[in-house]
Image: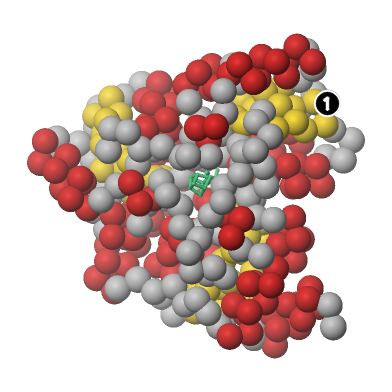
Amino acid sequence: MALIDKILKLKRDKRAVILAHNYQRPEIQDVADYVGDSIELSRKAMNEKEAEMIVFSAVDFMAESAAILNPEKKVLLPTLGARCPMAQMLTVDEIKRCKLQYPLAPVVLYVNTLASAKAYADVCCTSANAVEVIESLDADTVLFGPDRNLAEYAERKAGKKVIPIPEWGFCPTHLLFQPEDVQILKMQHPEAVVMVHPECSSEMRNVADFVGSTSQMCRYAKESTAETFIVGTEEGLLHRLIRDNPEKKFILAYEDAVCPNMKLNTLEKLYVALKEEKHLVTVPEPIANKARKALEKMFEITN
Ligand code: 13P
Ligand code: SF4
């Protein structure tokens, strides 16, 4: 039996659902029940009533959020080492230190954080709703971590003081994009529209026609009348963009923009995870209970 058929059979037999992030390998996206950005996948995980098991093909913090929102379900991460380096950049000690410095500022944490950090957040957000979440808070100054670029973007859009914690947090993959590369591509494709992820630098955002989460970029490309797009995010998104818009052309703004952690998941590992029910993602209850409140607050704000 082909690997894909084995996965589909196991999935049926075990009443499992496969959620995959937009950066997953094409063959994983194709076998998944649902492919999306962080907010869509968290919502899917939260509303998943039928399945007994969730196989979350992505990185650690996304599977952790699913486990927090579904304490009664088995949540599996196909590769134990698939960890977002940016999520590791914000420690609990750093949050405590900043809270002492700014006692009145609410703590808004990007979902790209560890559960232990989320436990200290007033509210979570994703790249799709960071601006909306910050605008909704009754405060002119907020602490925001760990992505400095998203903090900067949200500060400009929401018109509030957004203090990045730590001061230097970043995504190594989105840092690879340079406006000079976009300028060269624009010379070759003057009609192209530029869309980038808010984790890119402000210089990249300044040359973009659209800034949004991975799924927001998919919607933008679908609705736009443009035929050519220069894309500033991880290369995995191109599979979905091309599949959904076969008549349009998508060019990666930097051709080696790969998140090595996202790419650790393979079809083979997905199969083994389903078969052997590993790697089980668990979050200690006291941490999960606090982190869940911050995630639920985000859902209340953004519906
Ligand atoms: P999205 O929520 O936009 O999919 O982003 C997740 C991420 O990790 C970006 O690097
Ligand atoms: Fe983390 Fe960046 Fe990879 Fe997203 S692309 S999972 S932020 S390292």
Is residue 276 among what the camera can see? Answer: yes
Q: How many numbered discs, if any?
A: 1
- Placement of 126 over or under 102, stated as above or below: below
Q: Position of residue 194 (x, y in %)?
A: 67, 23
Picture colour scheme:
secondary structure
- Placement of 221 over or under 292, stated as above or below: above
Closer to the camera, 81 or 297? Answer: 81
Instruction: Give the residue displayed 76% in from the left and 61% down from the top.
Output: 27
Instruction: Give the residue displayed 63% in from the left and 60% down from the top.
Output: 20
Closer to the camera, 275 or 163? Answer: 275
Q: Position of residue 58 (x, y in %)?
A: 56, 59
Residue 95 appears left or right of 159: left
Binning the other alpha carbons within 10 Å of mark 1 as few (below 14), some (14 to 19) or many (20 upward) gives some
The quarter of the picture where residue 149 lies is: top left
- Placement of 299 over or under 211, stated as above or below: below
Figure quadrant of the N terminus: bottom right
Is residue 138 among what the camera can see? Answer: no
Q: What residue occupies the far right of the structure in this picture? A: 247
Instruction: Give the residue displayed 69% in from the left and 38% down from the top.
Output: 219
Q: Secondary structure at mark 1?
A: loop
Residue 89 appears left or right of 195: left
Amino acid on which disc 1 is placed: Glu
Q: Does any atom of ligand 1 lie closer than 8 Å to the CB of label 1?
A: no
- Placement of 265 over or under 205, stated as above or below: below
Q: Position of residue 204 (x, y in %)?
A: 54, 22
Residue 124 appears left or right of 197: left
Residue under pointer 1: 227
Instruction: Give the residue displayed 54% in from the left and 16% down from the top.
Output: 206
Q: Position of residue 9 (x, y in %)?
A: 76, 83
